[in-house]
Image (spheres, helix red, strand yellow):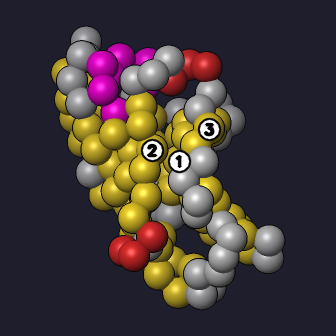
Amino acid sequence: QVQLAESGGGLVQAGGSLRLSCVASGSIRSPNVMNWYRQTSGKQRELVASISRDGDTKYPNFVRGRFTISRDNAKNTVYLQMNSLEPEDTAVYFCNYWDARANYWGQGTQVTVSS
């Protein structure tokens, strides 16, 4: 099993920044991909950013260069730097770990952006 512990959520004004962190522990295999998703009430969970163990990143169009995902493999930690936050970014953000044999989710951390 893999355990994921997120931190860094909170309340921020529009235009502000937050940095989310997610520490993975347990049976971590290589290769793997770590992702950030978000979900608001009544909507499906959507991918925000993805990073492979080798550092290849992917972002959906709505991120528009505002978010940056990174990881420290030595610390089994993935980060999400979010800049120029908008009220529409308000959601619960979830860390996700995927390898060929497993798919795990963190508990989520609330991000609230006030206008």
Horizontal placement of 85 versus 71: left or right? left
Q: Could you tell me how far apart the alpha carbons at marks 2 and 3 are, in whole angstroms? A: 9 Å
- Residue 54, x across and y down, in percent: 58, 59
Sequence-first tag of 1 and 3: 1
Image: magenta residue range = 82-89
For residue 59, above or below residue 85: below
Residue drawn at (26%, 38%), measured in percent from left and top?
18
What numbered label is drawn on residue 36? 1
Q: Position of residue 79 (x, y in %)?
A: 38, 52
- Quarter of the image with the C terminus in it: top left
Q: Position of residue 100 (x, y in %)?
A: 80, 71
Q: Is there any visible trace of residue 112 in the rendered image?
A: yes
88 vs 68: above or below = above
Q: What amino acid type is highlighted by mark number 3?
A: Lys
Q: Which mark is residue 69?
A: 2
Q: Which mark is residue 58?
A: 3
Task: Look at label 1 and name its amino acid.
Answer: Trp
Q: Earlier in the sequence, mark 2 or mark 3?
A: 3
Asked whether residue 9 appears in the rendered view, the answer is no
The amino acid marked with disc number 2 is Ile
Q: Residue 1 location, x and y as percent?
A: 62, 85
Report crowding for label 3: few under 14, some 14 to 19, many 20 or more residues within 10 A (C-alpha).
Answer: some
